[in-house]
Image (cartoon, helix red, strand yellow):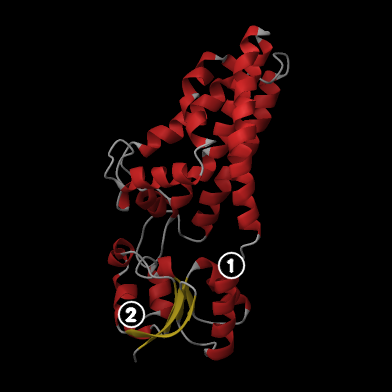
Amino acid sequence: MLVQHTDRRTRKWNLGVFFVSFTVLVSSYPVFALLKNELLPGTGHVSLTGALWWQLFGRSGSGSLLDSSSGTFSLAKSWVDLDPWLLLPGVLLIPAGFAVAWLRPIGLALLIQVVMMCRGGYMPFAYVIAMLPFAALLIAGACDMLWARGRTWRVAPLAAAAVAAVLVVPAWATTLYDQSKTDGSADSRAATRWVIDHIPHDAAVVTDGYIWMDLKLAGFTRPVWLWKVDTDPEVMQKYLPGGASSIDYVVMTDQAESTLASLPTLRDGIADSTVVVRFGEILVRKVAP
């Protein structure tokens, strides 16, 4: 895209500035990790390269999009069930994107993401967020291309606009209206307030990333993000030296069995706990001494 949208006379300069800036920004991650002695795997600390390896190859896979019984297929189906109007047409237009030079980078970006879903690796729930912009651009680009070809070809984008007016806009409007009336973080805020008001600030509280930050800001000295349990030696040694017996409270929604299987200390702590109070799906559990 950079090559296509830069003038031939200044292309070398533009590409040079981009790649220098890009390299400096990206290199800040390994440089920061190197300064903290967390670039390479070692005893007693996490590492950037170790985390990358785990994300790509180490964690349990969700299966391939080509397997209808896989978690990836079920997740993709849930995306389409939620909104079929943007993702599906965008994916179907990938071949058209490759046929048009100025749409080719967008088609390639979306194709890479679809292919990654077929390899059988772990599929994050929010993976679709990165696909939606490219799907939207392909749809708009295809309509623009057809419109520019003349009166005969303009039937297709006009038909698409009619379908959007009759089906898509009402569906989106209803969903967006419902979302605007829903306070999705109310339970999390209520649970956080309860913890701050009722739990000693030196207690070891294992929780999710949202509540963890609020507890740190409130002065809690031993909050632990759930994904640090059993995965970060420094955190385990500092906050949970006794394993599950060092956990005082667990504040989060119920976790999948596959998640707890990879975090045995958290699993044991939950097994030896009782629910103190519930805020929607968020449970405050007190771990037995």
Residue type at numbered disc 1: Ser
Q: Residues within 10 Å of mark 2 (few under 14, many from 20)?
A: many
Is residue 147 placed above or below 160 in the rendered structure? above
Q: Residue at x 67, y 21 (%)?
A: 5
Which residue lies under the disc numbered 1?
185
Residue 28 visible: yes
- Asked whether 267 or 279 is in front, the reply is 279
Residue 1 visible: no
Is residue 254 placed above or below 138 in the rendered structure? below
Which residue lies under the disc numbered 2?
269
Q: Position of residue 100 (x, y in %)?
A: 56, 15
Q: Are marks 1 and 2 in contact (CB under 8 Å)?
A: no
What quarter of the picture does the N terminus occupy? top right
Left or right: residue 265 compared with residue 132: left
* Label 1 vs 2, first from the N-terminus: 1
- Asked whether 132 or 207 is in front, the reply is 132
